[in-house]
Image: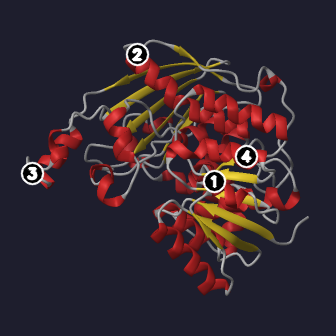
Amino acid sequence: MKETLKIGVIGLGGRGYSLMTTVMLPRPEIQVLAVCDLYEDRRQKAADKVKEERGVEPLCTADYREVLAMPELDAVIVSTSWADHVHIAIAAMKAGKYVATEVGGAYSLDECWELVRTHEETGVPCMMLENCCYGRDELMVLNMVKKGLFGEVVHCQGGYRHDLRDEVSFGRENRHYRLVNYQNRNCENYPTHELGPIAKVLNINRGNRMLTLNSVASKAAGLHDYLMREKGPDYDLSSCNFAQGDVITTIIKCAHGETITLTLDTTLPRPYSRAFHVQGTRGMYMEDNQSIFLDGVNNEYHFKWKEQWGNAEQFREQYEHPIWKQYLKEGVVGGHDGIDWLVFGAFFDAVKRGVQTPIDVYDMAAWMSITPLSEASIAMGGAPVAIPDFTNGRWINREPAPEGHYRLDAVCE
């Protein structure tokens, strides 16, 4: 088992720089030997930070291939724009480097298949950094599902419900890639925050799989209204006909009959929510009011459920996931309520031990494929579209994930 890891960071915008400073450099066993970004100011800022924190000047380059050519690197982190995640991850696997990439949807099914085939040809693990799989609530619910508290799971819901009007509208000023996507594409462009935890609840790719989806899009009115108020009619984007609908609804059918509803809602005023919802034959969990309903326990509140809003806290002591039990004792650190620290801990643990990652390339391909599939379904008026089986039938009896603290297909006490 490796005691230290040598890392390269590719992509140093707001997200990449934040991750480097909050979940990589604070770990003494992580050595950042290379930083890479197309923008000189971003990569130089990162290089200066590494030198300030560690006293070592990393390779500072605009060419990710120079990073992948470094023989001493154990792994690379890819936190670039959506359009660059997959081809850099593929190149990293071919270079023999463990690779972890930030989240986002794919642009085509072909790139999802290429991810899988490259992994199968090289044997090099590739992990999506889907931090929401390690959310405290998501893991407690996963623990309860594994213990049978909800019975047989029938339906799940989730969403990326996040007001991004400012970020999208001023993408040129902020050098952010979302703007061009919203101008040109109409799809479920960010499915993995909600789908990742649901996929682990439903054993997707390990005993179950997603079969088909239908997606529909509302009109696109939110960004136009926002820009007219914020910038006025003389601002060129105020009259832009954005392609991306304000609300995208996707329904997925699974091999064992379960259904999943995903909602993308990022260009209208609203509070943040991932709307995590798990419903089974004996109970359910609802994120938006932080409540758990169990058959035979809460039935008397059937018509007065507001009195039970927030009751999920009552289940913490008994059903807190072991990952969070230990984490709370050690002290929660890092961004996004601490889940960034956990997902990077999971990746680094796999690299140190030389084992498969708990979120693997088959997960990554399946979750990312929802984006181009939804785009096709929306273009055809909500027609059903088949979801590929990226495991080529192995989902039926795939071997369990490696044992370990961060495992997601089973609860390791």
In the rendered view, tell whether residue 231 sits above or below residue 360.
Answer: below
Residue at x-position 46% and y-position 45% = 274
Q: Nearer the viewer, mark 2 or mark 3?
A: 3
The Cα atoms of the two marked residues, 2 and 3, are separated by: 34 Å
According to the image, label 2 marks what residue? 382
* Real-space Cα separation, disc 3 to disc 1, in angstroms: 42 Å
Q: Amino acid at mark 3?
A: Gly
Between the C-alphas of marks 2 and 1, the distance is 32 Å
Q: State whether residue 334 is above or below residue 312.
A: below
Q: Earlier in the sequence, mark 2 or mark 4?
A: 4
| Amino acid beneath label 1 | Tyr
Q: Position of residue 45 (x, y in %)?
A: 50, 75
Foreground mark, 2 or 1?
A: 2
Q: Residues within 10 Å of mark 4 (few under 14, many from 20)?
A: many
Circle on res. 232: 3
Quadrant (top left, top right, bottom left, bottom right) of the N terminus: bottom right
Label 2–label 1 contact, CB within 8 A: no
Is the residue under label 4 in contact with that under label 2 (CB below 8 Å)? no
The numbered mark, 2 or 1, whose residue comes first in the sequence reads 1
**Separation of marks 1 and 4 at Cα, in angstroms:** 18 Å
Picture quarter containing residue 56? bottom right
Mark before the other along the chain sequence, 2 or 3: 3
- Name the image quarter holding residue 52: bottom right
Q: Earlier in the sequence, mark 1 or mark 4?
A: 4
> Disc 4 designates what residue?
126
User: Which residue is outermost to the right?
Assistant: 1
First of labels 3, 4 by sequence position: 4
Q: Count of labels shown?
A: 4
The residue singled out by tag 1 in the image is: 134
Tag 4: residue type? Cys
